[in-house]
Amino acid sequence: MPGGAADRAGKGRLPVPVPVPVAARVRARAGAFARMLACTRSLARAVAFALGLALLHAAAPAQPTPLVAEGGQLGPGWRVAALPRQKVPLTHYGVAEVDGRPAVRLEAAASYGNLVFDMPGQAAPARLRWSWRLERPNAAVDLAHKEGDDAAAKVCLAFELPLEQVPFVERQVLRMARSRAGEPLPAATLCWVWGRTEAREAVLPNPYSRRVRVIVLRNQADAAGRWFDEDRDVAADWRRTFGDESVQVPPLAAVIVAADADNTGAKSVAHVAGLRFGP
């Protein structure tokens, strides 16, 4: 009867679950586990990809900005640096397009000055590449003597060599020079130079300071008005020049492009293009 004992007894009871076959429960749990595993793998791949990008970024040395910006100006970050209390004129650094290449024009006339891109603490690149051409050679260049120590074109890397690795006397001289200069002078500078009568691949100390050492890449036998492409192994060239002080290549201080004619009082014109780091 409605409202009887049977109905009253049924009120408040939980529904009785409908039995689910064991196989179906197993399949459902397996599917859920598979979906969870797929999500985990996707997350792992994403993390691995992000870590890979981070490691790649950390391993790749920073690049100097291009010598020539898109607007036909010197690239941002490049600056002209002079000697402390310099009396001679500054070397002129302009922009030109030569054979379709945007290039920096180096004009020296009894002048001195470096085009510098600061990169303090950056890892040195494996390779350094650029192109250059000589338009007007300096016929008085003699890299072995002070009175001839000029170059129509040179590309240099300045390094943060620890002072304790610099020979004692040179270390004291460098400390004095740093105290007088308006900027921190590097402890080691390696330059690749366009010389005159010096043999190609000759290694020379700078006649003013052993803190600068040069490798002659081109000389008067290399035709003016023609592009030459360079690709240097930085570590190998470092060991050739400064290996007596440090086998390991120290961090960079700056990249330098330069021409000077203050010692010879002469004139020269050259172009440099496409300076970049390589793996």
Image: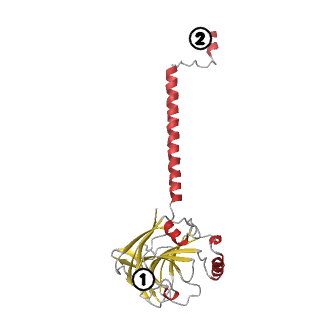
In this view, the mark in front (1 or 2): 1
Query: For the residue marked with disc 1, what is the amino acid?
Result: Thr
Quote the CA–CA distance across marks 1 and 2.
122 Å
Secondary structure state at the residue bearing disc 2: loop
Secondary structure, mark 1, is loop
In the displayed image of the protein, which residue is found farthest to the top?
1
> What residue is shown at x 36% (from left), y 75% (from top)?
227
Residue 116 % position (x, y): 51, 76
Front one among 232 and 45: 232
Give the residue displayed 38% in from the left and 74% down from the top. 102
Residue 181 occupies quadrant = bottom right
Q: Residue 262: x percent and y percent?
A: 50, 88
Q: Earlier in the sequence, mark 1 or mark 2?
A: 2
**Which residue is identified by label 1?**
197
Residue 44: in sight, yes or no?
A: yes
The outermost residue toward the left is: 99
Name which residue lies at 51% across and 58% down: 57
Q: Please state, as top left, top right, bottom left or bottom right, where the N terminus lies in the image.
A: top right
The amino acid pointed to by label 2 is Pro
Q: Position of residue 110 (x, y in %)?
A: 48, 90
Q: Are marks 1 and 2 in contact (CB under 8 Å)?
A: no
Residue 4 seen in this snapshot: no
Residue found at x 53% / y 55%: 55
The answer to whether residue 147 is above or below residue 210 is: below
- Residue ID for mark 2: 2
Spot occupied by residue 194 in the image (x, y as percentages of width and height): 43, 79
Q: How is the image coloured?
A: secondary structure
Compare residues 127 and 85 and report the one nearer the observer: 127
Q: Classify mark 2: residues with Cα within 10 Å, few (<14), some (14-19) or many (20+).
A: few
Judge by depth and name the residue closer to the eye, 169 or 250.
169
Query: Are there few (<14), some (14-19), or many (20+) residues within 10 Å of tag 1?
Result: some
